[in-house]
């Protein structure tokens, strides 16, 4: 069963947004594997995600439940370099190791690894992390 849960979890977008009603993507995958949750609860995954989950679970495909939120590309975190104090709290909060940097030095986000989970934002004591659309290289002004 752990391998099956892992396969379900890999299909999910790893935004950890909670729109599905669970505390993150892994708990949602566990609930689906146990037959306690349906495939249509993930707005970030959209209809394509719901279809992929249906294939793996061998159930009928259906669109995601729009009452849970709109499907849109996940934002990515961007650290405003001028404001970063190098505290490392964002690095510790990032569940996918998308933030790099050293203590007392500016940190940066590796955009292709960032899932847009937003967990780094409240961890930052100086509010130097903003969310931007994916593939946005511009520093906020």
Image: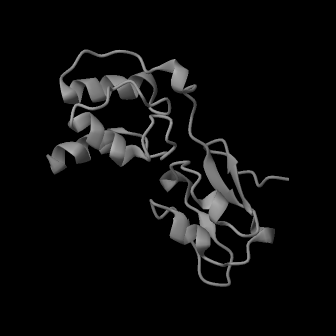
In the image, is 96 to the left or to the right of 82? left
Taking 53 as reference, is 123 left or right? right
Q: Where does the image place residue 54, in percent across and percent down from the top left?
A: 26, 24
x, y (%) of residue 15? 49, 45
Please state the total of marks drawn on the protein image. Answer: 0
At horizontal 35% and vertical 40% (from top left) the residue drawn is 28
Q: Residue reaching furthest left? A: 1
**Hey, which residue is sitting farthest right in the picture?**
141
Q: Residue at x 75, y 51 (%)?
A: 138
Which residue is pictured at 63% across the width and 54% down the height?
77
Q: Which of 66 and 108 is in front in this view?
A: 66
Q: Residue 24: horizontal and vertical position, in percent?
A: 43, 46
Looking at the image, residue 115 sits to the left or right of residue 126; the answer is left
Q: Residue at x 52, y 71 (%)?
A: 92
Residue 139 placement (x, y as % from top left): 77, 55
- Viewer-proximal residue among 43 and 105: 43
* Camera-side residue of 111 and 2: 2
Residue 47 image-quadrant placement: top left
Residue at the extreme bottom: 104
In the displayed structure, would residue 113 be above or below residue 31?
A: below
Determine which quarter of the picture holds residue 110.
bottom right
């Amino acid at each position: 069963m752990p391998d099956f849960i892992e396969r379900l979890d890999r299909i999910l977008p790893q935004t950890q947004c909670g729109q599905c009603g669970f505390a993150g993507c892994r708990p949602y995958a566990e609930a689906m594997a146990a037959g306690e949750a349906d495939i249509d609860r993930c707005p970030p995954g959209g209809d394509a995600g719901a279809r992929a989950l249906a294939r793996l679970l061998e159930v009928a495909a259906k669109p995601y439940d729009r009452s849970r939120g709109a499907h849109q590309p996940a934002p990515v975190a961007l650290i405003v370099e001028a404001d970063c104090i190098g505290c490392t709290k964002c690095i510790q909060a990032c569940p996918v190791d998308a933030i790099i940097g050293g203590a007392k030095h500016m940190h940066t986000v590796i955009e292709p690894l960032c899932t847009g989970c937003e967990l780094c934002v409240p961890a930052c004591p100086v509010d130097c992390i903003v969310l931007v659309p994916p593939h946005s290289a511009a520093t906020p002004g």
